[in-house]
Amino acid sequence: MQKATYCRKCGAMIKFERTINNKQMPVDTPSVFYIPDKSGADNILNEDGEIVKGRIIAEKQEGYRVGSRPHFGTCKRNNK
């Protein structure tokens, strides 16, 4: 498990996870539950280090997975 830190731009708590290309990607904390869905609105870094499309859900449901939201899409300073 990676140590949490803070985004230098917006101050949100983040952590860095390794992608399939062996790069470090900033992601939001905590991890999220999601349902894989190619037409889903959310980008998620899955446990294999790949960015996949899906729908983030609040509670565990049948077919759920655990992943992380890339911070690039949620950083309040990047999205202004």
Image: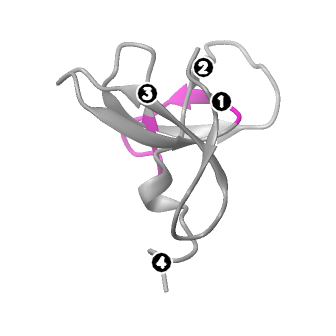
Q: Position of residue 42 (x, y in %)?
A: 49, 48
Mark 3 or 4 closer to N-term? 3
Give me the residue at 46% from left, 45% from top: 70
Q: Earlier in the sequence, mark 2 or mark 4?
A: 2
The mark nearer the N terminus, 1 or 3, is 3
Mark 2 and mark 1 in contact (Cβ < 8 Å)?
yes
Where does the magenta region start and end? Answer: 30-44
For the N terminus, give its image quadrant. top right
Q: Who's the residue at 24% across and 30% down the image?
A: 23
Give the residue number, with chain letter if any, for mark 4: 79
Mark 1 vs mark 2: which is more N-terminal?
Answer: 1
Residue bearing mark 3: 17
x then y, percent, for residue 76? 58, 73
The amino acid sitting under disc 2 is Val
Circle 4: element type: loop
User: Neighbour class for label 4 at 10 Å: few (<14), some, many (≥20)?
Assistant: few
Q: Is residue 6 above or below residue 48?
A: below
Q: Secondary structure at mark 2?
A: strand
Q: What amino acid is labelled 4 in the image?
A: Asn
Callout count: 4
Residue 80 in magenta stretch: no
Which of the 4 image quarters holds residue 19? top left
Look at mark 2 in the image and give the residue it sits on.
66
Magenta highlight on residue 37: yes
State which mark lies toward you, 1 or 3. 3
Could you tell me which secondary element the residue under label 1 belongs to? loop
